[in-house]
Amino acid sequence: MLATNYRGKRRIRVDRDAPIPTIQHPQDAIIKVTRTCICGSDLHLYNGNVPDTRVGSIFGHEFVGTVADIGPDVTNIKVGDQVIVPFNIACGECIFCEQELYSSCHESNAQSTALSGIFGYSHLAGGHQGGQAEYVRVPYANVGPMVIPENMDLDDAVLLTDILPTGYQAAEMGGIQKGDTVVVFGAGPVGIMAAKCAWLFGAGRVIVIDKEEYRLDFVKKYADCEVYNFLSIEDPVKFIKQITDWVGADVCIDAVGAEAAGDALQTITGRKLLLQAGSATALEWAINSVKKGGIVSVVGVYGPTGNLVPIGNVVNKGITIRAGQASVKRLLPRLIKHVQDGIINPKELITHRIPLEEAADAYRMFSDKLDYMIKPVLIP
Ligand SMILES: NC(=O)c1ccc[n+]([C@@H]2O[C@H](COP(=O)([O-])OP(=O)(O)OC[C@H]3O[C@@H](n4cnc5c(N)ncnc54)[C@H](O)[C@@H]3O)[C@@H](O)[C@H]2O)c1
Ligand SMILES: [Zn+2]
Ligand SMILES: [Zn+2]
């Protein structure tokens, strides 16, 4: 089958003769992939920022497809069903899954007690092969996959595997109160969705900060928000205070994570020298520009080691920080309804439809923000 193959930092190859995965456990399913996306999270792997990303890995945690085969214990889906597969792999039975903390499943990642298994996301996330391929093995297939409702566009469905739930959870974790000013750092797909969803929780003002003008133009229309380019602002923290009556934002959302730009010290220590687990610039800005007693919601991804964050300001300002990988399965029923009701139109984010064979080019374009790319979908 066709499959992406990681060969080292910024090197992706597409194999034509990768072995088709087979059922290895009675609760496995094999899914024939019909749509798969590249995510900002994949860029952390691609750019060599995630430890234990092994050569030969198939990336891809955002995919939908048709059930091609099931193990004898799989009863919730059948061969031929079209399914949405959440990016987190969850057993459905451990103490964390019981609390619907599916991204914290204690069983699906033997390599770590911090994080559940994630498809195609290094051995740090369990070493599960991903869905940027023609077929993918899905463990615990009674738990994750959900049948795609009739009439739902596959382009909408594939954005329900991660991007929409993550943006929604970013807003949810912000504990937004009616009328709140919410600042979203990052106008990538996750930040765009976070800005859109902030209104659903009652925000009175939504501000998005990025450096890519084309993304700011998009989110301004898509999420009906204020946008600012930090490249033309001398001090983003001071600027946010200035436009919030010198109080600070009620809620700040970090939708950037480890690849953040904007601060030379963070970039050099976090991205070039790997002395910290990514560049924490957006997180630092979020902490410093939220009001005293405000909430910082972090969905941007960082590595497992330490980061330079202004913890003293967190304490002295009495900030609440909430963070997490999205619990996709928990959110799917309500978000499917929002899509069906036309409240959110995820597929509008898709700017590029690229054959899986051309995944190497797609990675480079997405990483380098070329050709006004917002969200690429790969078609096997
Ligand atoms: N928690 C989760 O469950 C989850 C799920 C998906 C993605 N993520 C993470 O969310 C983050 C965003 O994902 P994405 O797909 O939107 O990525 P992306 O790379 O497409 O977008 C990131 C955006 O941040 C901008 N940016 C860079 N530095 C900035 C700064 N200092 N301030 C403001 N903006 C800045 C970039 O220009 C870019 O537009 C990534 O870290 C990704 O790993 C988390
Ligand atoms: Zn993703
Ligand atoms: Zn579990």
Image: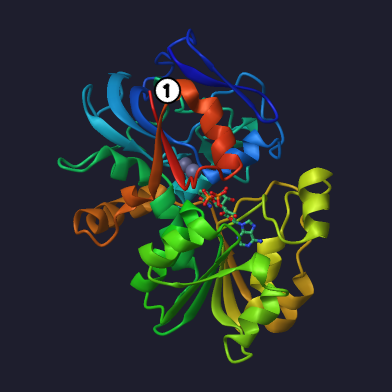
Residue receiving disc 1:
137
At 23% across and 39% down in the image, what residue appears? 148
How many numbered circles does the render carry? 1
SS of the residue under disc 1? strand
Compared to residue 228, the image places residue 7 above or below, namely above
Amino acid type at mark 1: Arg
- 265 vs 189, left or right, is right
User: Can the viewer see residue 194?
Assistant: no
Residue 65 location, x and y as percent?
31, 29
* Quadrant, the C terminus: top left
At 28% across and 24% down in the image, what residue appears? 67
Residue in the foreground of this view, choosing between 202 and 358: 358
Residue in the foreground of this view, choosing between 348 and 162: 348
User: Can the viewer see residue 373?
Assistant: yes
Residue in the foreground of this view, choosing between 332 and 223: 223
Pick out the residue farthest to the bottom. Answer: 245
Compared to residue 166, the image places residue 222 above or below, namely below
